[in-house]
Image (spheres, rainbow, N blue to C red):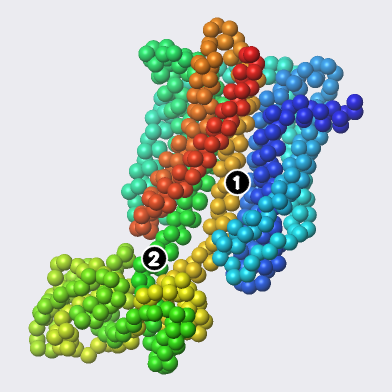
Amino acid sequence: MTFRQFAFNNVLRNKRLYAAYFLSSMFTVMVFFTFAIFAFHPVLSGEEMNSSVQKGMNVSAGIIYVFSFFFVLYSMSSFLQSRKKEFGLLMMHGMSMKQIRLMVFLENMLIGFFATVGGILIGLVFSKGILLLAENVLVLEGSLNFYIPFEAILLTFTAFMVLFFIISLFVSYVLRSRKLIDLIKGSKKSKGEPKANIFLTMLAILLLGAGYAVALIVKGLAVVVALLPVVIVVTIGTYLLFTQLSVYVIRKLKKNDSVFLRKTNMLLLSDLSFRMKDNARTFFMVAIISTVAFSAIGTLFGFQSYLTAGMKITNPNTFTYTAVDEGEEQDVALINETLQAENIPATMEHVVLRYYDYGVDTVVIARESDFNRFAALIGEDQVDVQDGQMKVVEFDGVPFNQTEELMEQTIPLANGVELKPEEEVVYARALPATDSYFLVSNADYEKLSTPEREESFYAWQATDGEEHVLAAAETLSEQLSPYEFLSGEYQVYEINKYYGPVLFVGLFIGIVFFVSAGSFLYFRLYTDLDEDKQKFKGISKLGLTDKELTKVLTRQTFLLFFAPIIVALIHGAVALTSLSRLFDYNLVTESVIVLSIFLVIQIVYFFIVRYFYTKQVKAVIG
């Protein structure tokens, strides 16, 4: 058997440990290859928007590539940690450290080669479906047809073979300093039970509490100012949570006889206590990576929802037209003709808005009858304004307004009477003013002074044929100025069209981060599998039943998988709540959707890993 055959067989003999590394690496290659397919797609190389999509894909591929480097490096360190005893035995049988380094180099290159080829092949198999999905998410006008991505294949293969080559050289270099005694002892070398520093334990609670408090208290632009300090404080607090606070809690539980001596808690807590020093760093890394994934996707999803909801709020009518230049009659006729051509029956209303300057920013003063006509158009309540009364109307749903300033103003009439606003504010979206304005009776409206300027405004509300509205809006947007013609549905379409690539890219990167975090947990669990087999084999001889063994393994795996994820979910919920206070927009629905999806994925992942982990431990016990 040649040395290369020995390295190949070594990979096959360690296929359980290499499986997660291989599959995770292959998934990373597949994601990178998918981005490369988009980057080189012929459709994404012409128009300005499509070009921006292409640039976004290129940047995202770069981010994934850099992240892949550290991910593979961490994976290899886990393998080396679990194989120290194996290396020691090989050295005892005459293998030199130079040969061990060469063996590890060949093994890693072999895994890297097949992971790269496998990722490319799987990417090709699913590329048509991914292109169809992207075509809808990206809201592209042209279709993303399937093509043979020779450039993407070449780029992916070259990039990842270089990555695995560099990682292999680095890992081989690290192995130089290993001593035989350390390798033989392997994982048996005790690091001692970790002890918690009471000062650092209290500091962890203080930092997390302060970070959460600031994030939940600040509003508006203060959220941006507080972002970096909060992130730093919470990150340090998270590290201390796992390295100090968790150790402190475990030691307290061990000293509580009612808890420690209850059923299998002694076995669980004693084992967890000795392994916490290693697991704490993994927990911290997984919690931070998962928080980034949750927050990034939740932010992108929430921001898109905020923008589209804002368009729907500020544009309650199907179409609106504001006369800016000459040609008002021709433009209105064009809109009516387009509605008729698209078979969209609609009701039209027209009003001349008057703007006045009474010591505040120019403000609209509307009459009761005009307001009620437009209120009826969108199904809002009518308002009754008596002579001598004046009401302030605030555009419902718009957080920034001049209501407070208007409540302090008085409006003089031609007969010398001054109108003062009533305390009760009217919330409506009837007229197009996106800021607060005054509403007076018809009679008082005629007694106002000459306005600073006037503006002719039209609104159409479709009564049927909503499925044709987008086509009509697109046609009219090409012929009319955006300062004159507005359509809420078409603006939402434009937002999704330009925002889709950002959401698509963020979703992919978030998934890569989350899958990688799950893989870290998998590596941590299976690194100690051989030790766990021997430990539970010995304990089973003392009378541990099969049911109790399953319970201990389930709880141990549960803590490993969900301790960092629960922390990350809390971090993500606080981050998204802070984001909602920045925009003064409720993101509860979006936050629940994003966090729930990730939680479900983690639960499924937990049950799969627990099944195979428990099966392998029980196989040794027999």
Query: Residue 105, image x and y in percent?
Result: 79, 34
Q: Is residue 35 visible?
A: no
Kind of residue at badge 1 = Val
Q: Residues within 10 Å of mark 1 (few under 14, many from 20)?
A: many
Query: Residue 583, image x and y in percent?
Result: 38, 59
Q: Residue at x 41, y 19 (%)?
A: 253
Element type at marker 1? helix
Compare marks 1 and 2 and give the one earlier in the sequence.
Answer: 2
Query: Residue 61, image x and y in percent?
Result: 65, 54
Q: Quadrant of the N terminus?
A: top right
Answer left or right for 410 relative to 73: left
Q: Which mark is residue 12?
A: none
| Residue hosting label 2 | 310
Work out whether 558 lies above or below 166: above
Q: Residue at x 40, y 37 (%)?
A: 207
Rounded to the nearest angstrom, the CA distance separating label 1 from label 2 is 31 Å
Kind of residue at badge 2 = Gly
Hey, which residue is sitting farthest right in the picture? 2
Work out whether 113 lies above or below 394: above
Hey, which residue is sitting farthest top in the picture? 542
Q: Quadrant of the C terminus?
A: top right
Answer left or right for 260 relative to 79: left
118 or 52, nearer to the observer: 118
Q: Residues within 10 Å of mark 2 (few under 14, many from 20)?
A: some
